[in-house]
Amino acid sequence: MPVAVVSRREFAGYWEYLLDKAIYTMPYHDSYGGAALLDSEGALVGIGSLFVNDADPSGEAAPGNLFVPIDLLKPILAQLVERGRASGPANPWLGLYAGEAQGRVYVRRIARGGPAETAGVKPGDIIIGVGGRRVASLADFYRKIWARGAAGVEVGVDILPIGSKDLAIENVSIRSLDRHNWLKLRHPQ
């Protein structure tokens, strides 16, 4: 089914995921997962990833699909096939699922037993900054975390705790992990 690319822009997912130039298409197609996005000459330009409600860059609610640009996959494809992941240091993972509303980044939920839960972060906490540097958006939050170093680094997250009466911002130190190792992926025997 023919679709049109309606925008190329940033996408930040609550599961600590960020694409700088995701490809958004319309109309929505329900068989998007893993689908090939081809240009007018038939060259592969993207791989289908998500259904989104905001495909139209105008800000109006508009169902569409999000594609991962193939240029991101080309340099790591052999590694993905061989190892199941890209080589090199992994980004720090905090195990918190964040959202963004009314210009604020907040904790939607926490990975049970993950680094953020161990550090005392709770759903509903508002994320003000990372290491004393204010965050402007969910994407900015991830960039500031990942700029701290590789998985295993200690990340100071400035939080306004849910239910705070005095509005005092707390700095919570979270020892990040490699998400791949935390998931304890197992292969069938």
Image: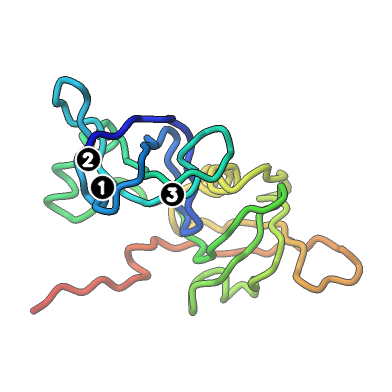
State left or right for residue 113 relative to residue 100.
left
The mark that comes first in sequence, 1 or 2, is 2
State left or right for residue 186 relative to residue 21.
left
State left or right for residue 19 relative to residue 130.
left
Residue 52 badge = 3
Residue type marked 1: Ala
Q: Secondary structure at mark 3?
A: strand
Residue 76 badge = 2
Q: Quadrant of residue 109?
A: bottom right
Residue position marked by numbered label 1 in the rendering? 86
Point out residue 54 in the picture as x, y percentages from the top left corner.
50, 44
Q: Which is more foreground, mark 2 or mark 3?
A: 3
Residue type marked 2: Ile
Disc 1 to disc 2: CB gap under 8 Å: yes
Q: Residues within 10 Å of mark 1 (few under 14, many from 20)?
A: some
Point out residue 72 in the picture as x, y percentages from the top left corner.
29, 35
Vertical position of residue 121 compared to residue 130: above or below? below
Residue 75 appears in the picture as rendered: no
State left or right for residue 46 relative to residue 155.
left
**Cα gap from disc 3 to disc 1, whole angstroms:** 26 Å
Residue drawn at (58%, 38%), measured in percent from left and top? 59
Q: Quadrant of residue 43?
A: top left
